[in-house]
Amino acid sequence: MNFKKKLARMKPHLQTETAQTEPPTNHQPLETKQWRDLQCSVIETDQGTVIHRQNTYPLQVAERETLSFSHVFSNWSNLSVHQHPLKPKDHTEPSDLLFLDTETTGLSHGAGNMIFMIGTGRIVGNQMVIDQYLLPGPENEVAFYNYFLKQVHHLDALVTYNGKAFDWPQVRMRHTMLRHELPRLPEFGHFDLLHAARRLFKHQLPSCQLSVVEEEILQMGREEDTPGYLAPMYYQDYLQTADPTHLAGVFEHNEQDIKSLFTLYLELSDRVLGGGKTLDEAFEVARWWKQQGEWRLALHQFTSLVDKGYGNEAVVERARLLRKHVNEEESVKLYEQVYTAASVHKIEAARVLSMWYEHKKKQYDEALRVAYQGLLWCEYEPAKEKAAWEHRIHRLKGKCEHRHPLG
Amino acid sequence: MLFEKPNLEQLIAQLKEDEHVVHWHTIPPQEARHAPLPNLDERIIKAMERKGIESLYTHQRDAIDSTTAGSNIVTVTPTASGKTLCYNLPILQSIAQDPESRALYLFPTKALAQDQKSELAEWIEDSGMDVNSYTYDGDTAPAIRQKIRQAGHVVMTNPDMLHTSILPHHTKWVSLFEKLKYIVIDELHMYRGVFGSHVANVIRRLVRLAHYYGSRPQFICTSATIKNPKELAERLTEQSFSLINNNGAPTGKKHVAFYNPPVVNKALNIRQSASKKVRQLARRTLEARAQLIVFAKSRVRVEVIYSDLQSMMQKEWGPASIRAYRGGYLPSERRAIERGLRNGEVRGVVSTNALELGMDIGQLQVCILTGYPGSVSSLWQQAGRAGRRQDEALVIVVAGSTPIDQYVMNHPAYVLDSPAEEARIEPNNLLILMDHAKCAAYELPFHVDDEYGGVPINDIMDYLKDQQIVHLRRDKWYWMSQAFPAHNISLRSASQENIVIIDQSEQGKAAVIGEMDRFSAMTLLHEEAIYLHQGEQFQVEELDWEEKKAYVKHVDVEYFTDANLNVKLFVIEEDEAVPRAHYRRSFGDVAVTIMPSIFKKMKLSTYENIGSGPIHLPQEELHTSGVWLDFDESALLQFGKNRFEHMLVALSTMLHHLGAVMTMSDRSDLHTAVQIKADHSELPAIFLYDHYPGGIGLSEKVYQRMDEILHRCLLLSKQCPCAHGCPSCLGSGEHEGLKQDVNRWLATLIE
């Protein structure tokens, strides 16, 4: 039987993907005028067509009075830290940063997902230059990436929002598909602002989506924004109708995202460098330093949080750092404090104190007393934890008896 | 001593004299046939020396020679004949020559991949070669996935993982695809029916990507005994194959006893139940201190036999000495049983066909089959569980009262002499093809001149274009949808999702105890159904059809449940037809509406109907292919409407049984229906149709071999010793003279 007839008959059994809008019409050649109306240029290359839109804005749009790129860069280099995920590499200038955001035909990570727009932002003098590259149709992918890679020379200071997990792997995936027709991808380095935003704001924001961070942290609202999740649909509409006006909102959205990245990079750097705007933020900043191995900075900040009465969380953090890097006796004082307070860390405190009395002070009775307390607190802990305490108590009992032999 | 229990040898002697053993067949032992080692890398030779391998079996040598010569091969040899060497050796050799060379091993299940991984690991260690071999499945830790993709010489996976994970993300697997030299398909015979048809499409996609990356992989397949291994391999991969079947492995002496339980009611031809007889035979075996496996066809049977044997044996051997094994169990439960079998703590296992797969559970001496398993291949697969090594082994086939069981008892030659059945697949089943065409389009754009499965790609893509899934630009079809197609397509069953079975006997401690496909759930997990798990009874309290969950509670009752299905059927289009003297045989498309109607409660001990209830489930609609026979009015006029209706049902029962045997399918894959006045012809008609949307080639085969099947039906009915028809032939014996009428009628149909 005819395949198409059979297909029509089996239609009820065939899975359909989510239904979409109007049926397709024949495509027309690229309408240069319509593109021009969107401030785009149509670039013809040997391999195909690329759409390029460039807009320039004064850098002040992104900067704020005291918060300029030169200011932030010099603050970073003045601070004697080895590394931090927001710290620019030595000898880099603000103009080396490349802010980047992509729009894709879907959110899956597989080979059927395409990037249809790459937006970048650079600093040129006191200007913010936004370049947006659009794929005018899937057949132009080689031209699209060749043109993009020619335009951007280095990718070693990318600034993205979730680019580590999404945008960049997508670029790499598409590059692999076309690797015989494209130059090698240059080395890349990354500032992923989503990670930074999550660290600082996850406790104060309902989500760390860029739009939420913009509104709550940067106090920048958007008017008439096209939500990002609709971008794939608008792109489909454009492909079906060949009418670029469907993409106007997507261009705007992408450009706004990039502009926000400029401001957000400054804001995040400023908060990290300035020790956070609130005590909670200060605490997160300190923990971040600690994780980067910058224990002195972290200790300094935890100490000031303790002084400001931040609570046992900071006390414990401070105690840990002291114990590891400075002086155990100092830390024991803090652990005593935690031990007597109603803190979730009191089991840890009991462990440290019990060890301290046992090994350093040789006060086995005291160590045993603390250990009993520790075991008591462990009621809801995993069996392994309890067993460790029982083992400790057993050992300490032995030591106590040895010291005070009966009779 | 007088009361000493007989050992296995004595048990065999006793059984030989047993009057109910209708046929005794002894397969003589076979001496090993060896061939010298081929030219291999010295490290591989060293590993063979360490393992004490001085020569190969003939089939292993042939496999290696053919592979080296560049042929795709399929080896067909019995279990425990060293088939893994047939692929491990050429692949190690190719890696020895080119360290960049890659191989992909496909196993039907995760567990098999794990087993083979340890085997290959030993070879790698003994040879001292620098070869990375990994399993890649849902359990693989994310941390090592990257390493596997880039540096795995041998990647062992299953078709599902290939389908949802590897192929759609092929850009992460460039180093595998670019140098893919071999694709190993182990247990080829498992890829039949719907599953096989899906896998054939997965392989189309795999090969398409391999070509895209510039590699032309060669196939090495291994299969259990089926009639058409070469054809199956060729259909599955769309390439030509050489068959390697000169088995050189030694086998021990094996006895096959055909046991037909005694007739207890002569008039109705009712025999003693097979399960009961199996329990007795199993007991005698266990007393003879022989390790045993019992196969039963359904889950229910397994659980019933299991609980009976267990209560019989637990005093002497402890409760864990007998175990049940079937598909619905969770992996941890299955592993424990396998371990027990290997170390001997488990004396006997009662299993469904789930154990058919080639897991090496060690040396069992006796295998008892409760009923003929439905195909010659399955029979030999199951029988292969006994005496896998070189000592004497015993296989007992205990007949049930179904037509096919009785047919086999009366014609043991059918099983012993006839070649095994064919494995059928239909890769171009429209639904399956469309599903995978979508996945393929997602993976790589199609060119307008391409074909997929022999169908011009534009015919397929035009349909997807209308759904706005693909987009045509400059002669290429691009995927242009947010969807990830592979996620919605399951290779394993007709239905998309399995029903999860949740035990909520203890409040607050609900636990998942198993799962079941949707079509089976219609008849086994409806509300109030009694579901058996490890011999325990559970009653289904709620079946949440939308959420795909069945909530069950532990009960202790004296009955089991059995559901009825209501079926309506229409002919959509006749593709082919052959007119005969008194009937017309047609093949084409049919539409079927299925709805479970009622369930019956059957008493456990007597199978007596003790109650019933309705089943409330939505109806399922099915468009599929079928074969139908329209009978002219001569027989209707001759026998009268009432009698003829019974005759139609009787013939359809036999056609169903023998049709399923002929096509090597499960009886649940092929369904039957009867209409005294069919809508399409206004004539009496019998239908047989594939129980899968679009059809999977079963009824087509039945259509082609209808003359033979009708002939076999007549033989079955004539040779059955019953008077008026019985469950062993016509399905019932309630009507006096029915059998004679059916025989007369059948004689007119066979010219």
Image: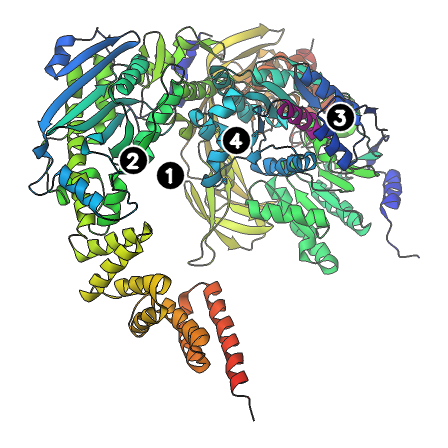
Task: Please state which amino acid type lies under the numbered disc 2.
Answer: His
Q: Which residues lie in the magenta part? A: B80-97
Q: Quadrant of residue B230 in the image?
A: top right
Give the Cα distance between marks 2 and 3: 68 Å
Q: Position of residue A73 (x, y in %)?
A: 18, 40
Is the same chain shared between marks 3 and 4?
yes
The residue labelled by disc 1 is B546
- Observer-side mark, 3 or 4, equals 4
The residue labelled by disc 3 is B415
State which quarter of the image contains the C terminus of chain B: top right
Magenta span dominant secondary structure: helix
Give the Cα distance between marks 1 and 2: 45 Å
* Image position of B270 with respect to B556: above or below: above
Give the Cα distance between marks 1 and 3: 44 Å
Q: Which chain's residue wears label 2?
A: A
Q: Residues within 10 Å of mark 3 (few under 14, many from 20)?
A: some
Where disc 3 sits, the SS reads: helix
Where disc 2 sits, the SS reads: strand
Task: Please state which amino acid type lies under the numbered disc 1.
Answer: Glu
The label shown at residue A190 is 2
The residue labelled by disc 4 is B151
The residue positioned 57% from the left and 48% from the top of the image is B332
Q: Which chain's residue wears label 1?
A: B
Q: Quadrant of residue B482 in the image?
A: top left
